[in-house]
Image (cartoon, grey):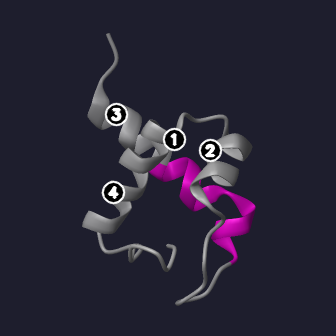
Amino acid sequence: MTNAVGDADAAAHAVLTHPAVSRLGPGGKIPTERALSSQLGLSRHALRAGLGLLEQRGRISRQVGRGT
């Protein structure tokens, strides 16, 4: 059995340390979920959990139809 919180935290860390994300400034857009999940080797479900965690922590802002 996996720990959902640990998985989300690991996904969040993977997103923040990904080169395409780590060099972005405020207002920059990260790659699409599909591209990022493929590049990081994560399921889209795990990636979404990580992105949700980053949003809760105020590290990213997400808007439907506008990207992250």
Question: In this image, 30 relative to 26: left or right?
Answer: right
Determine the CA span between mark 2 and mark 1: 6 Å
- Mark closer to the chain start, 4 or 3: 3
Q: Which of marks 4 and 2 is nearer the N terminus?
A: 2
State the separation of the CA atoms marked 4 and 2: 14 Å
The mark lying in front, picked from 2 and 3, is 2
In the displayed structure, 53 sits above or below 2; it is below
Tag shown at residue 44: 1
Asked if the stretch drawn in magenta spans residue 3, the answer is no
Mark 2 lies on a secondary structure that is helix
- Residue on which disc 2 sits: 37
Viewer-nearest residue: 5 or 33: 33
Q: How crowded is mark 1: few (under 14 residues within 10 Å), some or many (20 or more)?
A: some
Q: Are marks 2 and 1 in contact (CB under 8 Å)?
A: yes
- Residues at marks 2 and 3, CA–CA distance in whole angstroms: 17 Å
Q: Position of residue 22 (x, y in %)?
A: 65, 69
Q: In which quarter of the image is residue 56?
A: bottom left
Q: Which of marks 4 and 1 is in front?
A: 1
Percent of width and height locating residue 9: 38, 44
Q: Distance between the residues labelled 1 and 3?
A: 16 Å
